Image (cartoon, rainbow, N blue to C red):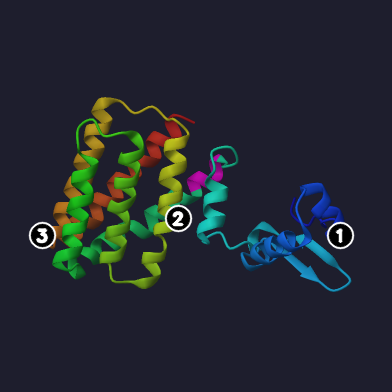
Amino acid sequence: AEGEVLPIEQELADSLHVGRNALREAVKVLSGKGLIQTAPRSGTWVRHRDDWNLLDPDVLRWHADPNVATRKFMLDLLEMRRIIEPKAAELAAVRASRKEVGDILSAYEEMSVEGISQAQRIEANIRFHAAILKASHNTVLNHFRFAIAAYLKAHAARGLKVSAADDRADLERHRLIAMAIATGKAKSAYSLSVEMLRLNRSHFEEQL
């Protein structure tokens, strides 16, 4: 829990059934991600959640685990997507290279393959959104691909039901976004992304 002081090194190692060297390495990793803090004579304690590096890929993955992900965390991720992705799509429509457009279209084509498994669909969807972020040519926006991947995987892991009609409509929205970017229609890419994510949130809230 936040603020909790961890046991001394040997006690913690014994309770976790690991060696002290392995424990020290783990503490170093968790400290680097902002989850815990160590100080001489004060020991090691769990930092406040506000101090955690929530954009770290590992921390995102841990939080998005369906066994621990809260409804609020999922909605926070979705809100972040609604802030970031429409602008990234707008920029991509202006800045994308021919290869980057090809990557976006290729990811969409993979998503739309009939009979594709859910796991393959998710990975293709992640590639689609990551390709758009990359095509924005903004290195900071590009880093948000980890957060989007975490959301998409966690969303799928929750097993939320999607009708065949809704699934086809979702694919069509992805196609329209891809084509807007490919044809340099920045305003359309932005507005289509806004609408897709609005519907995504609506569907998420209906089932939770």
Can residue 94 be spotted in the picture? Answer: yes
Quadrant assignment, res 70: top right
Q: Which mark is residue 170?
A: none
Quadrant assignment, res 129: bottom left
Residue 27 on image: x %, y %: 71, 63
Residue shown at 34% from the left, 50% from the top:
126
> Is 173 covered by the magenta stretch?
no
The amino acid marked with disc number 1 is Ile
Kindly report the distance in space between the C-alpha atoms of the residues bearing marks 2 and 1.
Answer: 34 Å
Q: Which mark is residue 147?
A: 2
Q: Nearer the viewer, mark 2 or mark 1?
A: 1
- In the image, taking residue 17 as reference, residue 135 lies left or right, namely left
- In the image, taking residue 102 as reference, residue 143 lies left or right, namely right
The magenta-colored residue range is 71-75
Kindly report the distance in space between the C-alpha atoms of the residues bearing marks 1 and 3.
Answer: 60 Å
Residue 94 on image: x %, y %: 18, 68
Quadrant assignment, res 92: bottom left
Q: Nearer the viewer, mark 2 or mark 3?
A: 2
The amino acid marked with disc number 3 is Thr
The amino acid marked with disc number 2 is Ala
**Residue ID for mark 3:** 183
> Is 73 covered by the magenta stretch?
yes
**Label 1 Cα neighbours within 10 Å, binned few <14 / some 14-19 / many ≥20:** few
Q: Which mark is residue 8?
A: 1
Going from the N terminus, do you reach mark 1 or mark 3 first? 1
Q: Circle 3 sits in a helix, a strand or a loop, which is it?
A: loop
Depth check: 169 or 151 in front? Answer: 151
Kindly report the distance in space between the C-alpha atoms of the residues bearing marks 2 and 3.
Answer: 27 Å
Magenta region's main secondary structure?
helix
Which residue ends up furthest to the left in the rendered image? 183
Q: Circle 2 sits in a helix, a strand or a loop, which is it?
A: helix
Residue shown at 46% from the left, 36% from the top:
157
